[in-house]
Amino acid sequence: MPKKSQFTQKEEELIKFWEDNKIFEKSIKQRESASVFSFYDGPPFATGSPHYGHVLASTLKDTVTRYWTMRGYKVERTVGWDCHGLPVENLIEKEKKIKSKKEILALGKDEYESIKIFNQACADSVFRCVDEWKEIFKRMGRWANYENQYATMNNEYIESVWWAFKELFNKGFVYKGYRVSPYCPRCGTPLSNFEVNLNYLKVPDPSIYFKLKIKGQDNTYFLVWTTTPWTLPANVALAVGKDIDYAKIKINNEFLIIAKPRLEVIEKYFKDYEMVEIYKGNKLVGWEYEPVFNYYIDKVDKKAWRVIAGDFVTVEDGTGIVHIAPAFGEDDMKAGEENNLPLIMSVDLEGKFKSEVKDWAGQFVKDADLGIIEYLKNNNILISEVGEKIEHDYPFCWRCDSPLIYYALDAWYVAVTKIQDKLVKNNLQIKLKDPNGSEHQGIRWVPDHLKTGRFGKWLEGVKDWNISRNRFWGAPLPVWQCEECDQIKVVGSRAELENEEIKDFHRPYIDMIRFKCSCGGEMKRTEEVFDCWFESGSMPYAQYHYPFENKEKFESGFPADFIAEGLDQTRGWFYTLHVLATALFNQPAFKNVIVNGLILAEDGKKLSKKLKNYTELNVLFDKLGVDALRYFLLTSTPIGEDYRFSDRMVEETLRKTVMLLNNIYSFYSLYGDSVKFDRDFAPENLENVLDKWIVAKLNLLINETTKQMEVFDLTKAARPIAEFINELSTWYLRRSRERFKSSNENDKKQALATMHYVLLNLCKVCAPFMPFVSEEIYQKLKGNKESVHLEDWPEVAVELINTRLLEQMESARKIIEQALAVRAKAGIKIRRPLSRLYITKKSLPEELFFLIKDEVNVKNIELTDKFPSDKNFETGADENYKVCLDLEISEDLKLEGHARELVRQINFLRKEKGLSINDLIELSYKTKSKTLKKTLEKFGEEIKANTLTKKLIEDQGKEGLEINGEKILITIRK
């Protein structure tokens, strides 16, 4: 294991301090009677380890909830765990080397025993990584309540899910239907349309053109295209566009019919053809053709193998003639219902051909594609080549990665299309009020474009949601159906089970409950379980066991003030929350949502264990600490975009922000710890221009960070912090350095008091973003509260934002920047003083002219409209400022420059010898240089004062120094 950094060691001490003193609990308790800021935490699966994506989302959540706590609100942070569904089942299947549902049902002596064994294994696995999650949360400074954590597998949670289902059923928003759904043959269950969107891959598939003979017309064929040859045994019709032009062409002794705009297909396979006739698609409707296969020719009870009209037919690809197999396509089934077509189910639930398809019976459909193509070729039906492929996006199971097929079967649906208008309205138009009283129209999305873009567009094209899964480990559907008359009973609570003995609502125990039907028959539970997305989408109320308990608690915090997850959840958890909340309560489930992008490696590739392109979380924590990672994640990339990530980038954040802040405090503490000053000073009474300036900048920071946090733009809220820390160090602290050790006691104490005030308030601003370093410095500053995280968010003192002073300081810094550029151009070091700086007339306070003189190292400043043009003068300018430097260096200026260089090198030696600012020294020297002797005579007292030398004597020296080409030996004695 790598050695832990000093930051890591300090962070771990602070975690212990927070735990020992129950700081998180106190932060909630002290707001017990305050207004509620409601936060929903999306439940992760705890069957796997947390990764950088979880750390990113957790950083967003923790930052926001810490901020609103400091703003005076009661912010409870209850975590929960997603326990059910395919993710857990697939894990157990891999561990037990189970390859199909049949094998699950063979685990025990009967179905009951088999399901019991399998579900128990699932139940035992769901919390295997919870301790690891908690440890990562704790280590990264994320505060959460584990005592009241919820789990979707608990009976109380399931009971609330049942309540929601029954409410939807009673409202007419739930139905059972025989429809085509995305289906995983490996898992043996249908999936929802948004689950399909979670795992599209670009893959090659067959691309075949084939001909179908038209009945009653000699040697005349329809030309058809498909990428799913396996569906051809179930073909019952061809679809054309009524208003599309179709061409009948002659090739040798055959006639082919194809959409006229698609004649390029003919040109690809044939050199010559003759145009015979043009038809409107409407004329083709009703024509009959001979099927490719005759497996079902005597088994259909409706008129098949005929041409129908379809508004879904296009001429963008293919031939403008679409093959229809109602069992295996949504458009196909709809067309079949509208045209009274038969439905041929040629494939079983394992995705294998049934016995009727004799040539490929028992073969997985995708594996049969090549054999079907060979058949078409051997029977002179294929026009294209056998091996032709098309690369396109194809759906795969989001959990087991098996190719999906579209498959007709019975399932339970939420009629999302019935509430589409309300879904759109609740996203875009409903007025929502935040805890601070501000209103916004519709859900506030960060980034904003998702509102009408990815999420908004998704709502415009909603489909009914398949919520049932033909699986085992999940909240069971609370539906019982009579075996005699098909009457349905929906249960919405434990009480309605009429069986108080049941201790576990899962299968197989729930399956044993029966009801008497009014017809005298017995009602048996339907075997399906819920889609796990329905369960996680129910968490706003199910986490509280609503409506059976905590009614007021749920209602006071609904809709949530804030949620946050990754971009993929726009079609996952965000969507299911929105659908269920709208259907049940006609409200959105959340008012504000932050959506993060992916974390990628520095080269843009996904983080991958195989590629070894990232550092393990705990190793990174130990190496660089948590604050640097948190602040990097909050500031490096605008929220919603993908991150480029590397240790180097986090290390840069550590150095430029976290370490710099620590160094600022360290410098302050050298003087602040030993000097008594008024820590409760009034900033409005400041006299020094630098003090006034840094206090104004501090309040600007508070104002900007507050403004952006109120609208949940964390990147814009966090970035100014680093800018302020940099200015605090490189301008205020550097320009005030001499004041901290000044003999002017009043100015020294004012500088220290200002610094204390600024650091204390800066700690409060940093607390939500960098909770560790802010706590460390706050404790050293001896703040008024037990922890910075028990403080209130600092109020903006508008009266201290001296806009005129800020503008004047900016002008002064621009002038300095130009003057230093002139020095650099002339090759004159900053330590060598110059006599005069000329500036175009500028209205600045006297103090700022003094500051400019000191920073540029000139003796005098002259305001003028006309600059000297002598060769000894050099000018510089930008669009706003013009300066001119007198470059002539007199003998006195040379000596002063030597003195400054000597001071610099002596102080460097002091530092090398480990001397502190309290250590006075004796300094002896020996030099043959007349120039340096003159320097020491003229500036000896200044050199002594600036190097903390009590005695300066010409004697012997050991350390050799070179001062602008002149040599001297010195010895330092303590």
Image: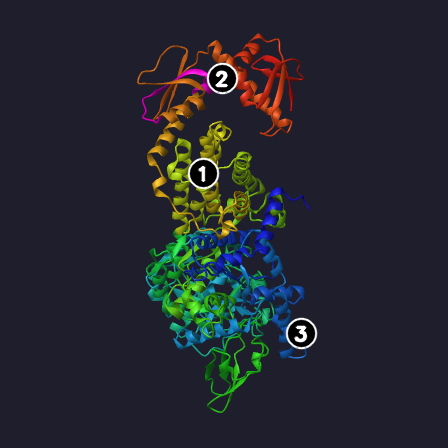
- Observer-side mark, 3 or 1, equals 1
The kind of residue tagged 1 is Phe
- Observer-side mark, 3 or 2, equals 2
At a point 58% along the width and 42% down the height, the residue shown is 647
From the image, tell me which residue sits under label 2.
832
User: What segment is highlighted magenta in the picture?
Assistant: 822-845
Q: Residues within 10 Å of mark 2 (few under 14, many from 20)?
A: many
In the picture, the disc for residue 107 is: 3
Q: Residues within 10 Å of mark 1 (few under 14, many from 20)?
A: some
Q: Is residue 908 above or below residue 326?
A: above
The earlier-in-sequence mark between 3 and 1 is 3
Q: Residues within 10 Å of mark 3 (few under 14, many from 20)?
A: some
Q: Quadrant of residue 926?
A: top right
In percent of width and height, residue 812 lies at 38, 27
The alpha-carbon separation of the residues under discs 3 and 2 comes to 88 Å
The earlier-in-sequence mark between 3 and 2 is 3
Task: Out of 397 and 865, give the one closest to the viewer.
Answer: 865
From the image, tell me which residue sits under label 1.
724
Kindly state the secondary structure of the residue where label 2 is placed: loop
Kindly state the secondary structure of the residue where label 1 is placed: helix
Is 582 a magenta residue? no
The kind of residue tagged 2 is Arg
Task: Out of 545 and 243, give the one closest to the viewer.
Answer: 545
